[in-house]
Image (cartoon, rainbow, N blue to C red):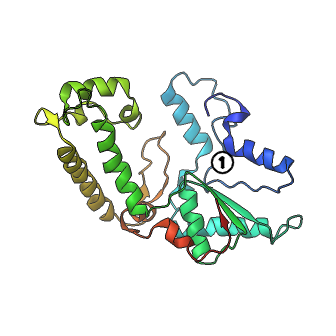
């Protein structure tokens, strides 16, 4: 949230609501994350968004720890936290429910499939049901194509440069992703769905080949500037190009409830 209040911390708010209803709640964040924008040390000298970003990364993110994150220890962390909560003296070890958001649903499904955790139920928000490969391809190709095609104002099945300009001005989707209007301009005067698909498919293929060529232990992103935080290593990033197992299939032998 962006209201500058405790309500912005959605999962803290959810946790407090659940505690009031008799649940014991254990929240978990990525290793190397020490604070958030609300409880970070104040920056009295920050005047620009860049300075605020630099202060946040310096105060809240330990990039040296983030550079060690892999797909495997990601799962290890979750399993460790799960076992801690399940075996806590004041909890009922047979009544455990896990909740994951987005990639959290993928990680929990992997742990359930491997029988490393066996919760009574699983609650998934913004659930990933497709494979990692499928979801990233949708994000970088299909979603972009559908967005731009929706800018076809005169419904003639092509999108002109003028319609790109108008659509970009009214729809800040690409702007928020750091994609410029110039990079979306059709090289031949107009886009068709087919030419758009080929364009973004080419970009996707190039990104895939470049990503898979990088050593697994390389930080992703590099974290070279003092306001750029490291998410993981490339071993984590590569999963989105090589794991073709639909997440929903990982739950086909799970006997608990899924919502």
The quadrant the C terminus occupies is bottom right
Question: Residue at the location (45% across, 67% down)?
Answer: 246
Residue 152 appears in which quarter of the rendering?
top left
Towards the viewer: 30 or 96: 96
Left or right position of 84 against 257 = right
Residue at the front extreme of this rendering: 155
Residue 169 appears in which quarter of the rendering?
top left
Left or right position of 16 against 69 = right
Please say if 171 is above or below 123. Answer: above
x, y percentage for residue 126?
Answer: 55, 51
x, y percentage for residue 242?
Answer: 37, 68
Give the structural element (helix, strand or loop) at label 1: loop
Dot 1: few (<14), some (14–19), or many (≥20) neighbours within 10 Å?
A: some
Please say if 113 is above or below 218. Answer: below
Towards the viewer: 64 or 123: 123
Question: Residue at the location (29% across, 31% down)?
Answer: 151
Please say if 127 is above or below 255. Answer: above
Q: Which residue is mark 1?
A: 34
């Amino acid at each position: 949230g962006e209201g500058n209040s405790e309500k912005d911390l959605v999962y803290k708010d959810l946790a407090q609501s659940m505690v009031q209803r008799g649940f014991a709640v254990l929240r978990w964040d990525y290793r190397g994350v020490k604070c958030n924008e609300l409880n970070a040390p104040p920056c009295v000298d920050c005047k620009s968004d860049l300075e605020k970003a630099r202060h946040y990364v310096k105060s809240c993110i330990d990039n040296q720890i983030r550079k060690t994150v892999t797909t495997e220890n990601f799962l290890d962390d979750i399993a460790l936290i799960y076992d801690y909560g399940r075996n806590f003296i004041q909890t009922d070890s047979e009544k455990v429910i896990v909740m994951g958001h987005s990639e959290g649903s993928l990680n929990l499904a992997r742990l359930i499939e491997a029988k490393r955790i066996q919760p009574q139920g699983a609650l998934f928000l913004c659930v990933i049901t497709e494979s990692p490969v499928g979801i990233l391809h949708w994000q970088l190709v299909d979603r972009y194509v559908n967005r731009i095609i929706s800018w076809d104002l005169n419904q003639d099945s092509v999108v002109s440069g003028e319609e790109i300009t108008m659509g970009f001005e009214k729809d800040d989707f690409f702007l928020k992703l750091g994609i410029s209007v110039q990079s979306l301009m059709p090289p031949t005067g107009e886009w068709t769905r087919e030419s758009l698909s080929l364009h973004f498919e080419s970009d996707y293929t190039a990104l895939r080949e470049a990503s898979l060529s990088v050593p697994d232990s390389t930080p992703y992103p590099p974290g070279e500037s003092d306001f750029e935080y490291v998410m993981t290593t490339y071993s984590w990033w590569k999963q989105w190009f090589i794991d073709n197992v639909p997440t929903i299939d990982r739950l086909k032998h799970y006997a608990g409830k899924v919502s």
